[in-house]
Image (cartoon, rainbow, N blue to C red):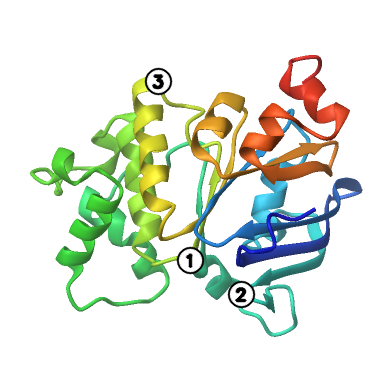
Amino acid sequence: MEADDDKRYKVRAIDLHAWFGTSHSLKGITMDLVDRHVTAIIGPSGCGKSTFIRCLNRMHEVVSGARAEGTVLLDGENIYASGIDAVLVRRRVGMVFQKPNPFPTMTIRDNVLAGLKLNGLRTRDPDALVERCLRQSALWEEVKEQLHKSGASLSGGQQQRLCIARTLALEPEVILMDEPCSALDPIATAKIEELIHELRGKYTIAIVTHSMQQAARVSDFTAFFYLGELIEYGDTDSIFTKPSNPRTEDYLTGRFG
């Protein structure tokens, strides 16, 4: 199942399987993420959505007892091949989590730079980088006079945008978002969705969401997962208006899930 062939693929998962212990969470997923587009991943709880995106930057394997098999190509190179540095993979493929997780003992400024320091990287002009990333994450105007304050002093929505700024500071090529709005109010959610629209022209984005309305609003492509399998994948308009699989239609119309 692939998106239109005239698009360039940034990430390609091929026969991807994942386990937690003996639990088979992903069962042979094959799908692509189109370069500089947004792909939404929908499906009921426990269907493998979050596990899938965690496999795309090798975060799945850091969980005790978790393992993955298959191929994930990033610009044509298998990130699971022997000798590939998982840390470098995670630098190129950033992750934004469900719950905002700024470092509470760090200032707003230092939170933006935290990923660089953790990776042993330096920048010639850290202040310029902080401003650029906060502008990209639509947070600069709100915090430019309080960069010395704790990241934990911000509202939930601001904290999530700070975490996005922290991800952007590493200059990733792909951004994975695991239900980034589930803990936010509607106003903060709207700001995150607007931010996704602004970032899509520069980054390849995959967003896991329980909200079908959100998937319809922000994504170019949508993948429907069910019980660890990819049921249907295509452009978002087609998935929501004329799905080809009855199970997709049943989920979208609320018959299950």
Mark pair 1, 3: CA separation: 28 Å
- How far from the left and from the top, in percent, is residue 21? 86, 50
Of pointers 1 and 3, the one earlier in the residue sequence: 1
Residue 29 vertical position relative to residue 128 in the rendered view, above or below: above
Disc 1 residue crowd, few under 14, some 14–19, many 20+, Cα 10 Å: some
Tags 2 and 1 touching, CB below 8 Å: yes
Q: Nearer the viewer, mark 2 or mark 3?
A: 2
Of pointers 2 and 1, the one earlier in the residue sequence: 2
Q: Is residue 211 visible?
A: no
Q: Residue at x 80, y 61 (%)?
A: 68
Disc 3 residue crowd, few under 14, some 14–19, many 20+, Cα 10 Å: few
Q: Nearer the viewer, residue 116 or 208?
A: 208
Q: Nearer the viewer, residue 115 or 206?
A: 206
Disc ID at residue 173 = 1
**195 relative position to 141: left or right:** right
What amino acid is found at the position of numbered circle 3 in the picture? Answer: Pro
Tags 1 and 3 touching, CB below 8 Å: no
**94 relative position to 224: left or right:** left
Q: Residue at x 77, y 39 (%)?
A: 225
Disc 2 residue crowd, few under 14, some 14–19, many 20+, Cα 10 Å: few
What amino acid is found at the position of numbered circle 2 in the picture? Answer: Asp
**159 relative position to 179: left or right:** left
Q: Please, which residue is most extreme toward the left here?
A: 145
Q: Circle 3 — which element?
A: helix
The residue that mark 2 highlights is 75
- How far from the left and from the top, in percent, is residue 31? 75, 56
The residue that mark 3 highlights is 186
Image quadrant where residue 154 sits: top left
Q: Please, which residue is most extreme toward the right here?
A: 22
